[in-house]
Amino acid sequence: MSKRINSILASLAAATLMLAGFTTSASAISFGFGVTGGGTHMEATGTETQKKGEGNGNAGAVQSATNDGQGMLGSAYGQIVFMEGTFGEGNGFAIGYEHVWGEAKVDGTSANVIDAHAVDTSTQGNNYAEGVISNLNTIFIETPGFTPLGLYLKAGYAEMDVTTNEALDTGGSYGNTTADGVVYGFGFKKAAGGFQVKTEFNYTEWDTISLSNNATVAGADNITADVENWTAKFGIGYLF
């Protein structure tokens, strides 16, 4: 886990303790849950490095490519809202956890995908690869909503599963992994009668993903990918 993510987690823990210290009565805290729906746009920039192997004249060759994908996402979240007595009903600092259902895909064939091969003509073939991002979980902190629009800022730590599906001329595969990232965002929230609505826009910067083709033949490769995604969503929840 990177130092940057450790810093995010330390900040979230410090914020929890600080806000708990400010709380003077049970009425200053709300517990809530809700659901959201929206979409995400993802971009991946990858680099492939050819492995050494007998007959592989391009061993060590490097290729780069960029691809993108979109997906519809739905989520459920739980949160604790502090200092409602200061900022108003359903408004305050919030710390929570969100789980996202749905997935986004990046795929391609031959040179259009980040794991396209740069091998000699004797080993060339059609290559298809698909990266599926799913099971996204986020720990977050939000500021109170300010201005009549309820403008708030958000930061958090996220984790996701990366599943690869491929048909490679080497006969190998990359396997699956997880990735960590940092979330930055803003949105607008309003609450009344226990209900809260949110409209939110997030950017997530993911740590570099590294995968290796398990084939031992010439032309197998290692890839790294830098992924980022932008998400827009609308949510409704209840506080009690």
Image (cartoon, rainbow, N blue to C red):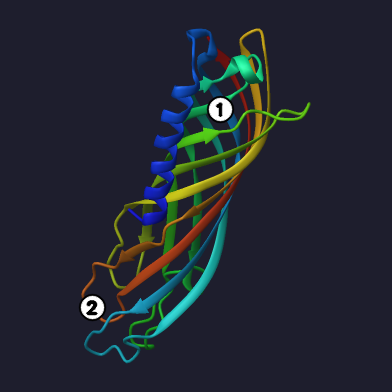
Query: Which quarter of the picture shows residue 149?
Result: top right
Determine the CA span between mark 2 and mark 1: 55 Å
The circle drawn on residue 132 is none
| Front one among 236 and 17 | 17
Label 2: element kind: loop
Label 1: element kind: strand
- Which residue type does callout 2 highlight? Val
Query: Which quarter of the picture shows residue 126?
Result: bottom left
Q: Is residue 111 left or right of residue 223?
A: right
Q: Position of residue 235 (x, y in %)?
A: 61, 26
Residue annotated with mark 2: 217
Say which of marks 2 and 1 sits in front: 1
| Front one among 58 and 180 | 180
Which residue occupies 48% across, 49% down? 182
Is residue 93 positioned above or below 192 on the image?
A: below
The mark nearer the N terminus, 2 or 1, is 1
Q: Is residue 211 visible?
A: yes
Is residue 142 positioned above or below 85 on the image?
A: below
Q: Residues within 10 Å of mark 2 (few under 14, many from 20)?
A: some
Q: Position of residue 96 (x, y in %)?
A: 47, 28
Q: Residues within 10 Å of mark 1 (few under 14, many from 20)?
A: many
Which residue occupies 64% across, 14% down? 89
| Front one among 156 and 69 | 156
Residue annotated with mark 1: 93
Q: Is residue 216 left or right of residue 68?
A: left
